[in-house]
Image: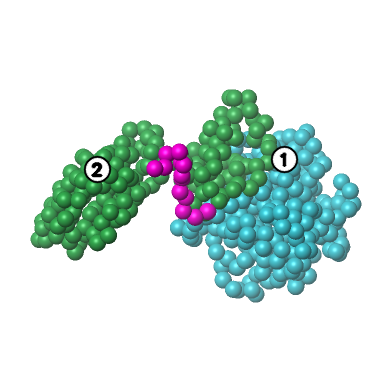
């Protein structure tokens, strides 16, 4: 799923400092699962903003709504009435959401309340890690099902580099496991260490962000 | 190995003559202070066969390795130009290979480079379109097949001797030699290792390299960095990932009067050089006397490596 986290309150307050009425819009998709932009977080953020602005002697009217998903036009529609007299929408979906909101309301200001951090998953309660960079051409089958593009700081395909020490990457001050150690251990378990002796050559990055905006089309589903 | 020269650099010729080669290192300055660079490089002249010029090492901005390599050529010294894949994509890297070859640079050390989080621009984007192994493969293909990555024909091939680094002290230990083997399979002809302190582990690494036949396919140079002080030794031990400084060396440095520590560090380096050269498969020494270039003549002399062979590059 898409992982996101809240922007600092001060940054959000600064973005909306000129407005009197805003809508805080959440999303019941990924950001609900990673506890950053669901119904609960919408309510908390709305209260925080009201309190902060009241304390500053500049009251703010905040309406709350959590879309089923913000990455589908039909789920943005319920915002129509709410935004009618609003100065701005503060979306706390992943950064796809505010862009859908912006597309629907050409004359309405839209701001992101979250920083979208990665495509990943939970590794323990309250901790989420990145697992995929959406390079558009998955190669993890060569590496025991683990992704060095995402999980190696140098995106090495012929790792591990000289900075792998006791299973830990030199980047991240001891907090990041060396994915190449994990790949090595896994291929050893699978009896496939020989795979690591093959020289991996150039990756085609044109399917990644480098190739320009990516659009996925399924002709059979198009109407 | 045949006496046919793929690049005709002085370094390649010395290796292929069967003599032990010695390389040094000279880091370009963090500015345009050419005189400082030349002064450091001058200490190496006649004491080493070729001089590595680093490419923004530790991800700190310095003047570029190609310019530094060209300055060395003008000083009558042979450069080993280092090139990292961190800062340029395949377009930039191939362009620099061609440019460097056009300037007469004949040795290229292919590296991935230190991560930018260690340098002075931790907010920089890194590239890593290729890694060191792909870079070596690229150069080999350009030189031997006349083909660029895209398949385009090179109009004039870059005649360069292909080098890379190896760290025998990183993990997983049993994979380090295998990884060096991958570099060699990709086209690497000489290896310069990370600084060696743990001689036991180094010896095991070389035994494995010999067993795998790698020392017959590639010239392996032992990387030696003299310990200048107890502080430096402690720093290397504690803070440089993949470096393994045994306590015995630190004890030795601590055991001499303060004004004798540097001399003891040099003594250790000389002992290490001699021990390395006695090992099967070690083809030379890469002496990285970081900001201590003025001590290189003394170390090389004490190690019995002078005079250096007089060889002309093609």
Residue B231 lies, in percent from the top left, at: 54, 52
Residue at horizontal 54 percent and vertical 39 percent from the top: A138
* Res B156 quadrant in image: bottom right
Residue at horizontal 26 percent and vertical 40 percent from the top: A68
Q: Is residue B198 visible?
A: no
Residue at horizontal 65 percent and vertical 42 percent from the top: A200
Looking at the picture, does residue B226 appear above or below residue A32?
below
Check if mark 2's residue and mark 1's residue have beta carbons within 8 Å: no
Chain represented in cyan: B
Chain represented in green: A
Residue at horizontal 78 percent and vertical 56 percent from the top: B146
* Res B174 quadrant in image: top right
- Viewed as shown, does residue A150 lie left or right of A69? right
Residue A19 versus residue B85: which sits nearer the camera? A19
Chain identifier of the residue bearing label 1 in the image: B
Circle 2 — which element?
A: strand
Question: Which residue is the site of mark 1?
Answer: B181
Residue B106 lies, in percent from the top left, at: 77, 61
Residue B128 lies, in percent from the top left, at: 57, 52
Residue B114 lies, in percent from the top left, at: 57, 52
Looking at the picture, does residue B188 appear above or below residue B294?
above
Boundaries of the magenta span = A211-223
- Viewed as shown, does residue B135 lie left or right of A189? right
Q: Can residue B54 be seen in this view?
A: yes
Question: Which residue is the site of mark 2?
Answer: A67
């Amino acid at each position: 799923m898409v992982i996101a986290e809240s922007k600092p309150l001060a940054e959000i307050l600064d973005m909306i400092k000129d407005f009197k009425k805003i809508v805080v819009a959440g999303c019941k998709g990924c950001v609900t699962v990673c506890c950053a932009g669901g119904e609960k977080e919408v309510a908390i953020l709305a209260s925080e903003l009201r309190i902060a602005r009241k304390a500053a002697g500049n009251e703010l009217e905040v309406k709350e709504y959590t879309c089923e998903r913000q990455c589908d036009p039909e789920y943005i529609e319920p915002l129509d009435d709410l935004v009618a007299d609003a100065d701005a929408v503060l979306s706390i979906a992943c950064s796809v959401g505010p862009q859908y909101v912006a597309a629907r309301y050409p004359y309405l200001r839209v701001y992101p309340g979250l920083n979208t951090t990665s495509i990943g998953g939970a590794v323990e309660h309250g901790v989420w890690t990145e697992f995929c960079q959406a390079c558009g051409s998955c190669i993890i089958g060569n590496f025991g099902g683990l992704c060095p593009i995402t999980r190696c700081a140098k995106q090495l395909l012929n790792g591990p580099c000289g900075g792998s020490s006791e299973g830990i990457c030199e980047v991240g001050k001891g907090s990041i496991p060396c994915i190449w150690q994990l790949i090595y251990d896994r291929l050893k378990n699978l009896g496939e260490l020989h795979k690591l002796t093959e020289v991996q050559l150039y990756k085609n990055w044109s399917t990644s962000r480098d190739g320009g905006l990516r659009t996925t089309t399924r002709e059979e589903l198009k109407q | 190995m045949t006496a046919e020269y793929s690049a005709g650099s002085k370094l390649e010729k010395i290796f292929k003559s069967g003599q032990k080669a010695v390389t040094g290192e000279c880091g370009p300055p963090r500015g345009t202070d050419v005189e400082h660079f030349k002064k450091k490089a001058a200490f190496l002249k006649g004491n080493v066969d070729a001089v590595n010029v680093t490419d923004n090492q530790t991800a700190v901005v310095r003047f570029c390795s190609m310019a530094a390599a060209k300055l060395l050529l003008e000083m009558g010294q042979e450069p080993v130009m280092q090139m990292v894949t961190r800062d340029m994509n395949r377009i930039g890297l191939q362009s620099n290979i061609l440019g460097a070859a056009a300037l007469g640079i004949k040795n290229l050390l292919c590296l991935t480079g230190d991560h930018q989080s260690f340098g002075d621009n931790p907010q920089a984007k890194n590239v890593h379109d290729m890694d060191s192994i792909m870079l070596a493969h690229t150069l080999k293909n350009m030189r031997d097949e006349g083909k660029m990555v895209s398949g385009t024909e090179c109009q004039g091939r870059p005649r360069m001797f292909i080098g890379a680094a190896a760290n025998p002290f990183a993990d997983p230990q049993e994979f380090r030699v295998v990884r060096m083997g991958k570099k060699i399979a990709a086209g690497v002809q000489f290896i310069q290792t990370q600084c060696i302190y743990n001689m036991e582990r180094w010896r095991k690494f070389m035994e494995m390299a010999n067993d795998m036949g790698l020392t017959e396919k590639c010239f392996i140079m032992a990387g030696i960095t003299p310990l200048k002080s107890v502080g430096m030794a402690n720093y290397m031990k504690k803070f440089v990932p993949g470096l393994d400084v045994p306590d015995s060396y630190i004890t030795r440095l601590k055991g001499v009067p303060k004004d004798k520590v540097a001399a003891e560090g040099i003594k250790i380096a000389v002992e290490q050089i001699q021990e390395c050269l006695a090992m099967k498969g070690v083809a030379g020494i890469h002496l990285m006397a970081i900001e201590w270039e003025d001590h290189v003549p003394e170390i090389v002399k004490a190690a019995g490596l002078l005079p250096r062979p007089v060889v002309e590059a093609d």
